[in-house]
């Protein structure tokens, strides 16, 4: 018996792009990973230094070159009116409503921050917030229509 005969052969075609909902979900997951890294760094008493690649055009020669620049990560948490820590979830510059009329999670202390961010990440991975992401994304897209 040949080696190919032992394998399950099928006809398959690779998709050229991801569905829009999955693309938006992945974008939010990357930002949540940055927030988790920032919260862990602050809990350990160190600063977070993330970098990203940027293409810069040299004015004199006209050449483009890639340089590594620092990436600024803003905290999605703040001290609320009651003095407790509040966490919001953002898509772009807009806050997501986690439930109708509720856009933040109140925490008892800073030690709850990383576990809550990880729960939010799991919820996004499971697709629980796809409707909220779609609503905010649609609102942001509508601003660009002429």
Image (cartoon, rainbow, N blue to C red):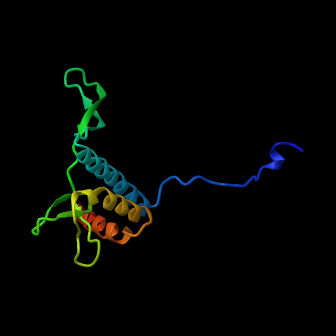
Which residue is nearer to you in this view: 50 or 80? 80
Residue 43, above or below 22: above
Residue 69, above or below 9: above
Residue at the outermost top position: 61
Image quarter in which the N terminus is found: top right
**x and y, in percent, of residue 63 in the image:** 28, 24
**x and y, in percent, of residue 27 in the image:** 36, 54
Residue visible at 31% across and 56% down in the picture: 114
Which residue is nearer to you in this view: 32 or 47? 47
How many tags in the picture?
0
Residue visible at 29% across and 71% down in the picture: 98
Which residue is nearer to you in this view: 13 or 109? 109
Which residue is nearer to you in this view: 102 or 12? 102
Residue visible at 23% across and 62% down in the picture: 87
Give the image quarter of residue 99: bottom left
**x and y, in percent, of residue 42 in the image:** 23, 46
Observer able to see residue 118: yes
Observer able to see residue 146: no
Residue visible at 28% across and 31% down in the picture: 68
Residue at the outermost left position: 81
**x and y, in percent, of residue 41 in the image:** 27, 44
Residue at the outermost bottom position: 100
Give the image quarter of residue 137: bottom left
Give the image quarter of residue 67: top left
Q: Is residue 105 left or right of residue 28?
A: left
Residue 92, above or below 68: below
């Amino acid at each position: 018996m040949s080696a190919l005969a032992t394998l399950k052969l099928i006809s398959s075609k690779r998709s050229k792009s991801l569905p829009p909902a999955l693309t938006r979900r992945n974008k939010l997951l990357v930002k949540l990973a940055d927030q988790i890294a920032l919260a862990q760094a602050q809990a350990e008493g160190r600063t977070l230094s993330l970098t990203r690649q940027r293409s810069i055009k040299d004015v004199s020669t006209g050449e483009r070159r890639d340089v590594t620049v620092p990436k600024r990560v803003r905290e999605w948490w703040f001290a609320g009116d009651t003095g407790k820590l509040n966490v919001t979830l953002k898509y772009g510059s807009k806050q997501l409503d986690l439930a109708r009329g509720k856009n933040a999670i109140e925490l008892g202390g800073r030690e709850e921050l990383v576990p809550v961010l990880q729960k939010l990440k799991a919820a996004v991975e499971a697709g629980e917030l796809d409707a909220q992401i779609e609503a905010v994304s649609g609102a942001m897209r509508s601003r660009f229509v002429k």
